[in-house]
Amino acid sequence: MGIARNPALRARLASPAITAVAAGLALAASAWAVPAWGQEPVPGAPRADGRAGGAGDVVACDSLIALRQLMARAGEDRGAAAALVAQEPLCRALPRAEIGAVAHRAMVGGAPYECLAVQAAPACLWVLP
């Protein structure tokens, strides 16, 4: 019996939970924008030199994927992430004064992430939650 002939199956597939999951997947897919292959980091944005960032520094990445990879390597520890930022080509430590308003928000694995406007960058940068 096909879906068209089975009203119970049709109703189940159209349930709000299924619709919410599909909408969430579409939102997550749109949040995972990755810079073009070979794209250089944002000009004018300072890079960390391998030392841990100061209290006024923010770890920011060009893509949410790069930020998540950095955090995975750091074991979700902000201090370790600041120390590892020089090893991630799409991430850098920025002074808090350069960070602007929220441009995009995403929830991944229950954790909130924000893409914030930066003065020297043409696009927003993803920051640690």
Image (cartoon, rainbow, N blue to C red):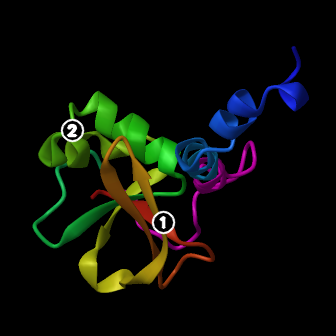
- Residue at image location 68% in from the left, 44% down from the top: 14
* Labelled pair 1, 2 in contact (Cβ < 8 Å): no
Magenta span contains residue 73:
no
Q: Nearer the viewer, residue 49 or 100?
A: 100
Is 45 contained in the magenta span? yes
* Element type where label 1 sits in the image: strand
Q: Which mark is residue 88?
A: none
Q: Relative to residue 45, is residue 64 depicted above or below?
A: above
> Could you tell me which secondary element the residue under label 2 belongs to?
loop
Residue at screen point 22% across, 67% down: 57
Q: Residue at x 58, y 69 (%)?
A: 43
Which disc number belongs to residue 76?
A: 2
Reply above or below: 107 against 118. Answer: above
Q: Main secondary structure of the magenta part?
A: loop
Rendering coords of residue 58 (x, y %) = 27, 65
Give, as a single range, the part of the protein colored magenta: 26-48
Residue 98 can be seen in this image? yes
Report the front residue among 107 and 44: 107
Labels 1 and 2: the sequence-earlier one = 2
Q: Quadrant of residue 40?
A: bottom right
Q: Quadrant of residue 114?
A: bottom left
Which residue is labeled 1 in the image? 125
Q: Is residue 71 left or right of residue 11?
A: left
Kind of residue at disc 2:
Glu
Residue 120: percent from left, percent from top? 52, 80
